[in-house]
Amino acid sequence: MSLLEKVNVTTGTGWQMGPCVGNTGTTSVGFPSLCLQDGPLGIRYAYPITAFPAGITTAATFNKDLMHSRGRAMGQEAQNLGINALLGPCIGPLGRSPLGGRNWEAFGADPYLQGVAGQLTVRGIQELRVMAVVKHWLGNEQERFRRKGELGSWPKVKEAISTNIGGRAAREVYAWPFQDAVREGATGVMCSYQQVNNSYACENSWLLNGLLKDELGFQGFVVSDWLAQRSGVNSVIAGMDMTMPGDGLSWADGLSLLGANLTSMVVNGTVPVSRLDDMALRIVASWYKLGQDDPNFLPKQKKPLFSSWLRDEIGPLYPRSSDQDQQMIVQNYFIDPRGQLGNLSQIQTGDVDHAKLARQVAAEGIVMLKNVNGTLPMSGGTIRKGPYKQIGIFGSDAAHSPIGPNGCIDRSCNVGTLGQGWGSGSVEYAYLISPLEAIQARAIQDQTTVDFVLQDGSNSVNSTAYQVNKHGKDAACLVFVTSDSGEGYISAEGNLGDRNDLKLWHDGDKAILSVADNCENTIVVIHSVGPVLMEAWADHPNVTAILMANLPGQESGSSLVDVLYGNVNPSGHLPYTIGKSLADYGADTEIMWDPNWEIPQQDFTEGIYIDYKWFDKHNITPRYEFGYGMSYTSFNFTQLEITTLWNGELAEEPPSATGLSGNPALWDPIFRVELLVTNTGKVAGKVAAQLYLSFPKAIEYDTPVRQLRGFEKVELAVGESKIVVFELTRRDISVWSEEKGAWVVPREKGGVGVGSYGVFVGPSSRGKGVSGETEKIPSVN
């Protein structure tokens, strides 16, 4: 490649100056313009596509097969549309604050869970030869002040917020899932908008060259979030390899910080030729690594088959250009990229019906939080025979939006049933099945009468609930409530990306109480981006069941009916903690609403203690703990066996080495854990066996009471038992030592070796399970 061609490979063509949200320049040596497209739950701006359940819902399944298959299906749709790189999965934010606007795009408030889900999603996407670009690196935990001048910023704020993270928290919490993605071979990493330790993430040499490329051994390319690049030379030298969308400091300004400027930097010696070679090599090598040079990778047209900006078949080559004489080309080929080839028995091939897959993920992502006296399933069970004959449905979340599911830009209005949050991580629905229409379809089958009040705050709620309740044990009232959030460039109902609080929207608490005060069998269904406060009504004697349905995507109603009527036994587990108040999560993790300086400084003083680790450390009792989830059956955990796999002495630090995802010794297996899980109930079901590790107490490091280090979902018939096996690696039992600058297996104070680790395996972080201890291991002096 010539100098100019290398520059083209690293520089976007500009906002709306190509078919995709990101497009690189072209070369004359057979390397094409690359198409980069959002996003984390499907293909943004393409139609029709599958609107999959959000990351937070996928995490709630605790099902590794579904995590992988969802990624594979998204990769299939991307490849079918001619997309080179999918901008996902999202494995940051981690959910430091439960109010964080983009938490829903990612996989929950635990780094281990995020890491596994992210790794399996990357695997699925890249098995279809599409590049996975994991994001956002690093510490982008709130929307407010993330970009200078963005919606919600204050006049005196001169630069984006700085998230100030210690070395230990960076590695044990925020970089942990990225390390798993790097180990899987993720080809791209997106650097985030905000500053980290007072240096912009996309020009932070410690973050990019040091932690990511050197320590974690990342071999792919670093691409800026859109307009996250804030300088030219500094970002290039610090390790950023590609700028997107290719404009300068403002949208569509055409003043790229790279492009011709990068050419000048190389010519005048400011940027070494070797650095430009490295930038281009990382991008081109990723293309070759996934086999995108194969003539069969792209469609026969050898370009993307859709336009993000135009809906007509024919349109200008550069949609934003003011050139009236530019070439007109075919922009939209109107193909359907969705898999329609069978059923979930084909899940390992990727040739699955994507609608069925989305429905299964959404159903397994529903978490049953409460179920009193056999309220559910609604089809009847061991306590109540036969389906309910009278149903009342309440709340706008039960039905379609009057302006359609795509009526607001990037899904930025919470009207009608909520299937995804808002922002660049959202997609256009090809269709959206509402709970009301799905329940009505089932009601016809059961000869059930359905009454409904869909207007939030309607005066007829009380009277309708009262009338439904007259049918006694044959009646049930379902209340649908929501809480929404999204990306910081849009405000929705006064929420500037981040949620203002953990309250239900549209007076949801009042709606629940109005129904429950008049209906003795009230079922609450919550569609939410994360935890909500429930103290006002969770213990109401007439609230007999609670379902946290998260963000189910296009199959909202169908997946809900699967669980409500028992076709699917609920098996979701909370990927976050539901506290009793916002204060439970710790004042340190509150969103910074007001700037504390011209460059807002957000110190992560809580360190490694977020979500359930904070609750445990401060002995706070949550409403529902991390990992919690009920079933229509019951499970027992027994016969725990722990075997030491490591032979001989175990060094505190592994020998110095580098490799893909860091020191290869971090992945050495140290312990093996086995146990027996039995279905002791009366129906078949699934449960996620979750392993939590407690570090030895007599060590010099402060460590969490427990932390997730494994999970496996098992399906069991009535009375069936299965052995579940976990392996614990050196990384799992290590802490990051600031003093040594390395991962270490902590020694007992005054001891001669590695102390005993506590092992707990159960259905949640505080559930009823089985416990044991590892044996001590002698150490190398």
Image (cartoon, helix red, strand yellow):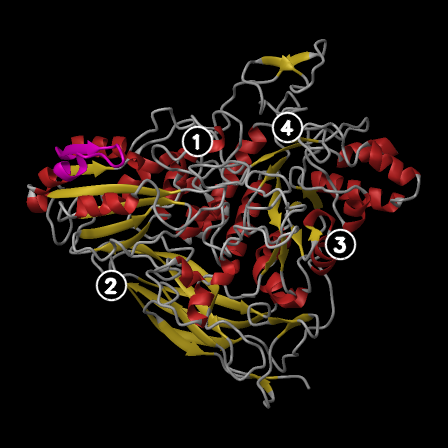
Q: Identify the element where label 4 is drawn.
A: loop
Residue 378 seen in render: no
Q: Quadrant of the N terminus?
A: top right
Is 447 included in the stretch rendered in magenta?
A: yes
Q: Report how far apart the C-alphas of labels 3 and 4 lie in the structure.
A: 35 Å
N-terminal of the pair, mark 1 or mark 4, is 4
Q: Which mark is residue 680?
A: 2
Q: Is residue 768 above or below residue 545?
A: below
For the magenta stretch, what is the residue range?
446-464
Most extreme residue toward the front, as rendered?
156
Q: Report how far apart the C-alphas of labels 4 and 2 lie in the structure.
A: 51 Å
Residue type at the position of mark 3: Ser
Q: Position of residue 730 (x, y in %)?
A: 59, 70
Q: Position of residue 563 (x, y in %)?
A: 27, 45
Residue type at the position of mark 4: Leu
Q: Position of residue 427 (x, y in %)?
A: 49, 32
N-terminal of the pair, mark 3 or mark 4, is 3
Residue underneath mark 4: 298
Residue type at the position of mark 1: Leu
Residue 353: image quadrant is top left
Q: Report how far apart the C-alphas of labels 1 and 2 lie in the structure.
A: 36 Å
Residue underneath mark 3: 205
Q: Is residue 772 above or below residue 342?
A: below
Q: Quadrant of the C terminus?
A: bottom right
Residue underneath mark 1: 341
For residue 565, side relative to residue 35 (left or right)? left
Residue 663: image quadrant is bottom right
